[in-house]
Image (tube, rainbow, N blue to C red):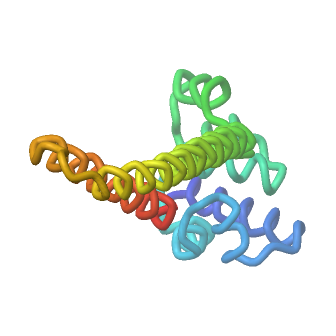
Amino acid sequence: MGKNEIALGELVKKARKDKKLSARKLAELCEVSHTEINNIEKGIRMRPAVLTLKGFEKYLGLDYAELCRLVGYSEDTIKYGDENIIVSYEKYDKILQDYRREIEHAAFIVESKRRLGQEIKESFDVVCKYIDSLDNVPEEIKKEIKWIYKDLENLDFKYESLMQER
């Protein structure tokens, strides 16, 4: 264990306790295992991931750049982390909300099409009964009608399974 790793561990542990966070809670916030937090605090983990250090900045109030320098990351890495890594997950939450809205919209469209398919099938039932009541309908037309009816039934099953997957 080097001096830097112990210093980082002590710094993290003190900040975590000052914030009244358990190692498990900090791990959850930073999206790492509680073992990772314990290893960092004990100085076993030599160089935590940049994302983890960004988490310490966000949730413990520690300076990200100082933490990076402490464990030996280059200035380029520090700059990259400052510019490109978002720990608050607000960006990801927004993307997730957008996807959920898209899924809801797609579900609405699927349900609308399912209902339309059901209405068409109901209307087609009337046509089928009428054609069945006629005497001189060529077999070719009757066959085609049965295929259409079968397709409408399959559509209904497909829409139903899509809605269940949701």
Which quarter of the figure has residue 50? top right
Residue 67 can be seen in this image: no
Between 85 and 16, the one lying in front of the other is 85
**Residue 28: percent from left, percent from top:** 66, 68
Q: Is residue 151 above or below residue 83?
A: below
- Outermost residue, left direction? 139
Closer to the camera, 63 or 94?
94
The residue located at (65%, 57%) in the rendering is 8
Residue 67 lies, in percent from the top left, at: 66, 44
Asked whether, in this view, residue 158 is left or right of residue 55, the answer is left
Residue occupying the point 81% across, 73% down = 21
Among the 4 quarters of the image, the one containing residue 92: top right
Question: At 72% from the left edge and 62% from the top edge, which residue is drawn?
Answer: 12
Apparent side of residue 65 relative to residue 106 in the rendered image (left or right): right
x%, y% of residue 140? 10, 42
The image quadrant of residue 105 is top right
The image shows residue 88 at horizontal and vertical percentages of 74, 45
Q: Is residue 103 above or below residue 165?
A: above
Q: Is residue 58 visible?
A: yes
Numbered label tally: 0
The residue at the far front in this view is 135
Q: Residue at x 69, y 75 (%)?
A: 23
Which of 49 and 98 lies nearest the eye of the viewer? 98
Left or right of 114 on screen, residue 151: left
